[in-house]
Amino acid sequence: MQRIVILGGGFGGVYTAMYLEKYLRKQIKRGIIELILINKDNYFVYQPMLSEVVGGSVGLFDTVSPIRRLAPRTTLYVREIEKIDIENKSVILTPQFTHASTKIPYDHLVLALGNVTDFRDNPGLHEHALPFKNLADALIIRNRVIDAMAAAANEQDPLLREQLLTFVIAGGGFSGTEVCAEVNDFAKKLCRDYPQIRREEINVILVHSQDRLMDKELPESLGAYAGKILAQRGVQILFGRRLLTATPEVAILDDHTRIPAKTVISSVPSMPNPLIEELNLPKNHGRIQTNTFLQVEGHRNLWALGDCALIPLKDSFCPPTAQFATREAKQLAKNLAAELNDKAKKPFHFKVLGMLGALGHHSAVAQLFGIFKFSGLPAWFLWRFIYWLKLPGFDRKLKTAASWFLEMLLPADAVQLKITPSQGIAQIHFEAEDIIFREGDTGDYLYILTSGEVEVFNKEKGHLANLGPGEYFGEMALLNKKTRMATIKCTKPTNVLALSKKDFGALIANFAELKRNFEETERLRREKL
């Protein structure tokens, strides 16, 4: 029996499984071929409509389809991948419900892992920027907008109110532009629920490193039109800038501009999946090099497609879009079936049919066949119709159409669905000169320095100490249930681990020796005060 293992449940992976089921139907039925798909979720996300989840234009589950329903003859493993072992032709899955890993051998391996939003090289973004890549990200962004609006409605401090009502989005490609438009529309619609907030107070800022929006996807005229439309709706667009880092209080750009904001969303940088980076395969700019048959160069049993693959065309390479991924999946499935049946393979050819981008508020931009350009309301109808037509499954089409119809009749709901458990220890990044807490503040967290340096001082005695990596602070207010007795200021970029008051209480209640250590440190520091 030949086993084909597919890694990834995006457009490339799911559509490959669907087409392989079609082209190898008889062999699968007879047990000659086994298909396995491995993905961390049991559903497929229709990415082009993901931004509409943020604004509530479509329901939470309208953009997802169960993978088992789309590919019923494929065995699905809903697991994280620990390692891809090319030499031993196997995939190792992380433990689930036990402490043992699972090893899955393969005869043919299809790599469709896509890219990830990776903030590893951007301190501060990892801790404080919200990515926009999957369904959970869209839900978190929606919840954040609602939280910020609700808090701002009752906030009297003008600076904090400004921070709560400022939303910074980094990246002016399709994803960044579409989520920016949805956040802007959604926040302003919510003003109906919060009469204390004027629409003019909402400040949505889009930061883009180029001189026009969607510069890689659309012609100059449509990119300029998109920028004009968003500007008319109150979005501030900062061209030629990059989001450098963020703290709990501000977004910091590469020209050192500091934007007071509590919400920072970033669709960049898009990086290769870490599993792909680890593979000893031919790569170019992090993408796996394939031949025109979509086989990894130098490997007959390895195949790659989608965002993680560099697939040659006649005079260029395939762009990382869903439109190409679905066509790549079809040709890969045909070629893999031909490889198994000792038949001739065919090279991949495809010319882009068009590109569409939503701008919210019944507006969009579109280009078809490289010739016809549309904008405004006609492009919006075209955008919705084409993507609705391509939604997999009649039930999803019906549900999405119903959501769109109801959206035109009923106001947006400020209902939250919070599914993320509270984090016991939070990672927080601060820049130099930032204040972590002030003298007189309520004690709410214990802080442990992992990098950087802070200065401790108060009004009575001035400078008290400098603390570095491995040291902690904040325990005095927690142990004595009093307000902060000193101010903590960063002297350089600093990272800390923050343990909440509740978790700190549970920790010292169960570890007597640890409690004594904290109390001794607190006693020594109190003597200095």
Image (cartoon, helix red, strand yellow):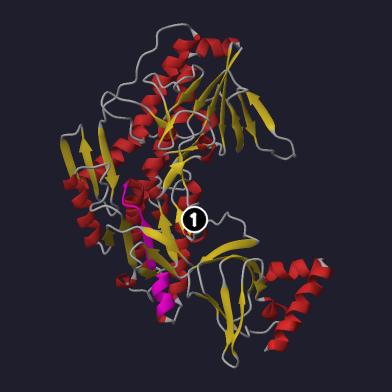
Residue 248 position in % (x across, y down): 49, 68
Q: Is residue 192 in sight in this rendering?
A: no
Which residue lies at the image location 43% right of the left edge and 61% below the top edge? Answer: 245
Q: Amino acid at mark 1?
A: Ile
- 10 Å neighbourhood of mark 1: few (<14), some, or many (≥20)? many
The front one of 98 and 190 is 98
Horizontal placement of 187 versus 450: left or right? Answer: left
Q: Position of residue 44 (x, y in %)?
A: 48, 36
Residue 404 vertical position relative to residue 168 in the rendered view, above or below = above
Classify 514 as above or below 45.
below
360 left or right, relative to 338:
left
SS assignment at label 1: helix
Q: Is residue 152 above or below residue 399?
A: below
Q: Which residues are magenta?
A: 159-173
Quadrant in the picture for the N terminus: top right
Q: Report the side of 366 relative to 451 (left or right).
A: left
Q: Which residue is mark 1?
A: 140
Q: Is residue 121 left or right of residue 90?
A: left
